[in-house]
Image (cartoon, rainbow, N blue to C red):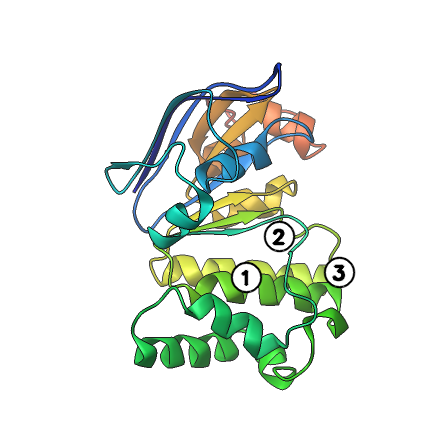
């Protein structure tokens, strides 16, 4: 579905990504984890066409998309839920959703998707006529995700969906991510909460200072000494207790 090879991105003369490579297979949830400033959001923004790569290759469904404009990438079926949500505050919930639904050409399919989104996020159905600006932070995050789903994307990219939300809302957001995975959705997740991210993902990549330093199946990463000590605050597994690379 998505193959990123040797990706390099620069902000002016500052290099943000150094030869980053990873893949996301169809129907798979993949997590990119790492500290603040590692370049995780830069990866998503570059795939989405917000930033232009300085080098490397981005192939989506066997088509090169590196350097395409954001609207072109969106029309190919890539949806990004950015950190900070970025809903249209003056528009109602339903207007936000239907605007995103315009990327679908089948009107009947748009109505079906809207009903499914309301079933997935009942709070949005209750507030569908309210302006997005009047929603709580958690409700706005639900709206941001629902809006991306309205485009019926082939690839959903989530940038720090748990940031600034209450534990109850975070639980609900990650229930939805699990449910999407069960439905066969393809998801690329960037998240600071390493435990949550690797619980819902099949595989993960650890990014530090713009480079991938570790990759593997999610259960193995959760048991890796680096992840246990640096990200989970746990002692490294002893001999015979895991910690594979």
Q: Could you say which is closer to the camera, residue 129 or residue 140?
A: 129
Residue identified by numbered label 1: 145
- For image coordinates 35% across by 63% down, the residue present is 183
**Which of pointers 1 and 2 indicates the residue nearer the eye?**
1
**Residue 161 left/right relative to 240:** right
Give yes or no for contact between labels 3 and 1 (Cβ–Cβ under 8 Å).
no
For label 1, the SS is helix
Cα–Cα gap, marks 2 and 3 = 12 Å
Q: Residues within 10 Å of mark 2 (few under 14, many from 20)?
A: many
**Viewer-nearest of discs 3 and 1:** 1
Where residue 161 is drawn, which disc sits there? 2
Residue under pointer 3: 166
Residue 21 visible in the displayed image: yes
**Image point (62%, 52%), residue name:** 161
* Quarter of the figure with residue 34: top right
Q: Are marks 1 and 2 in contact (CB under 8 Å)?
A: yes
Task: Kindly tell me whether residue 224 is visible in this rendering.
Answer: no
């Amino acid at each position: 579905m998505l193959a990123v090879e040797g990706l390099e991105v620069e902000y002016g003369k500052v290099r943000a990504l150094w030869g980053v490579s990873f893949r996301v297979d169809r129907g798979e949830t993949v997590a990119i984890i790492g500290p603040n400033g590692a370049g995780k959001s830069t990866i998503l923004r570059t795939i989405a066409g917000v930033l232009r790569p300085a080098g490397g290759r981005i192939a989506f469904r066997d088509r090169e998309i590196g350097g395409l404009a954001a609207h072109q990438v969106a029309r190919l079926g890539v949806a990004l839920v950015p950190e900070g949500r970025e809903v249209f505050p003056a528009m109602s919930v339903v207007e936000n959703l239907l605007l995103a639904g315009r990327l679908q050409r089948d009107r009947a399919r748009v109505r079906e998707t809207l009903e499914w989104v309301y079933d997935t996020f009942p709070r949005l159905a209750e507030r569908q006529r309210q302006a997005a600006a009047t929603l709580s932070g958690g409700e706005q995050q639900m709206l941001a995700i629902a809006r991306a789903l309205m485009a019926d994307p082939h690839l959903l990219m989530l940038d720090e969906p748990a940031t600034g939300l209450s534990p109850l809302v975070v639980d609900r957001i990650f229930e939805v991510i699990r449910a999407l995975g069960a439905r066969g959705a393809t998801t690329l997740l960037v998240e600071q909460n390493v435990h949550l991210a690797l619980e819902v993902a099949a595989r993960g990549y650890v990014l530090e200072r713009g480079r991938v330093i570790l990759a593997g199946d999610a259960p193995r990463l959760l048991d890796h000494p680096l992840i246990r000590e640096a990200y989970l605050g746990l002692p490294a597994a002893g001999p015979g207790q895991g910690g594979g690379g």
